[in-house]
Amino acid sequence: MSWWVPLLPEALLVFFGIVLLGLGIPAQIPRWIISATAFVAILGANALIGIFPLEGEWLRGAILLTPATHVGRLFILLLAAIFLLLAHSTLQATKHFAELIGLGLFAVAGMLFLAAAGDLLTLFVGLELAGLPIYALAAWNKSEGRGAEAALKLFLSGGISAAIMVYGMSLLFGAAGGLSFRMLANAEFDPLLLLGTFLVLAGFSFKLAAFPFHLWAPDVYEGTPTAIAALIATGSKIAAVFALTKLVAFVFQPWNHDWGITAIQICFAFLGSASVVFGNLGALNQKNAKRLLAYSAIAQSGYLLIGLAGGKNGISAAQFFVIVYALAVAAAFAAIVLAENSHKNANFDAFYGFCQKDPVASTALLLSLISLAGIPPLAGFLGKFWLFAAAFESPWLRWLVALAIGFNAVSLYYYLQLAKAAFLTPRAESQNVPPPGTFMVRCLALALSLSVLILGLNPSLLSFLLKL
């Protein structure tokens, strides 16, 4: 089969992204044409992945496809469709809708490329192709100072993390003599190999919103339109996790120098524990739902990194966890869209009396919060359980599992604060009843939250694909 076949989904998305940028030049292009064009691109990319379920190395190892990679890429496209629906329903005032969706398609193409990476160069190109459009999307609210500040923080954090990652990759290239994961796995041990790995992992922490590049997340989540924040919070994280787990599986695990592997586990443990502490403590004082989800994302990344510190068993657990996390967060953002209809913000007071105003959306919000808190029978519980079980197998990581469980109990407080605002705090008489939310957004929120419940009751629907 030709070498270009594995790149067809990304090429299709880039082509339609260029088409949409061209459609944005003429005036008065109907929004439904733009949305339909983007949906065709997403559906086509999804079909290409299904028609050509390729496996193995392509382009001399630049692309590495596994069954788990296909699962991750399909879920990235699902989240792209969710972004499209939320953008179509909420960003009605923007004058450059075609350009916005075109940039979104470029970002999704980068996420697919990142998830399929088989060497360091492809990995970095995927990171940048996914990141550069996101920088522009984060500043979409030009009239609001918060949006500009959020975009600046995102750009600076992304630039610094990219520089650190490139330097780490240069050290890995010098130590291994090549860029492919196979060459890295077979490299003779060298201190440069370890130092380069640490720097690459530090760069990954930006995409994961994990320590030490986590401070951009609260301002970006709050300052960007909710549809764009949903794409940043879900699609980017799935792509980064699937690329990171591929590094763990194909590079770190085959190393034959035990103390080098232990050093990598210590690095994961340090980044994970710091993220858990910073994320949970930062969320305790929040009064804005989007900022709360941002700090929650930092903490959730910490749980994931702790699971990866456990080694091989943490790989599939991390992939399962990030998928159910993304579904739960997407449901929460869809509910936030409906709550924002009247208040134009996501402060807790926008949710007062939410269960009376919109029982469907409030139920979806509650289910997503329960999953994020790791309470059974939602899938978030199983995701955290498998992560902690993977880490618990290493005796020296058990204290870290205890730390994570303790802070997960702390997270119940701030999740319940938002649930309290939606279900137990009555709406003030002076507040106006918001207009009815978009029907499709309400259905989306319910479907996503129910999917998390179904995966919690029957995890084999997803776990067998990831060989968990």
Image (cartoon, rainbow, N blue to C red):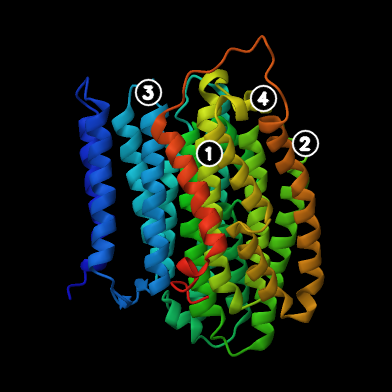
Q: Secondary structure at mark 1?
A: helix
- Whichever of labels 2 and 1 marks the residue nearer the N terminus, that label is 2
C-alpha separation, residue under disc 2 versus residue under disc 4: 18 Å
Q: Please name the amino acid that badge 3 sits on.
A: Gln
Q: Position of residue 84 (x, y in %)?
A: 36, 39
Which residue is at a point 57% across and 66% down the rendered structure image? 318
Q: Quadrant of the N terminus?
A: bottom left
The residue to which callout 2 is attached is 285
Which residue is at a point 78% across and 68% down the rendered structure image? 400
C-alpha separation, residue under disc 4 versus residue under disc 3: 25 Å
The residue to which callout 1 is attached is 333
The residue to which callout 3 is attached is 92
Q: Secondary structure at mark 2?
A: loop
Q: Residue furthest bottom?
A: 256
| Quarter residue 274 falls in | bottom right
The reply to whether the C-beta atoms of the residues labelled 2 and 4 are less than 8 Å apart is no
C-alpha separation, residue under disc 2 versus residue under disc 1: 20 Å
Q: For this view, does 284 lie left or right of residue 69? A: right
Marks 2, 4: nearer the viewer: 4
The reply to whether the C-beta atoms of the residues labelled 2 and 1 are less than 8 Å apart is no
The reply to whether the C-beta atoms of the residues labelled 4 and 3 are less than 8 Å apart is no
The residue to which callout 4 is attached is 352
C-alpha separation, residue under disc 1 versus residue under disc 4: 17 Å
- Whichever of labels 2 and 4 marks the residue nearer the N terminus, that label is 2
Which residue is at a point 62% across and 78% down the rendered structure image? 311
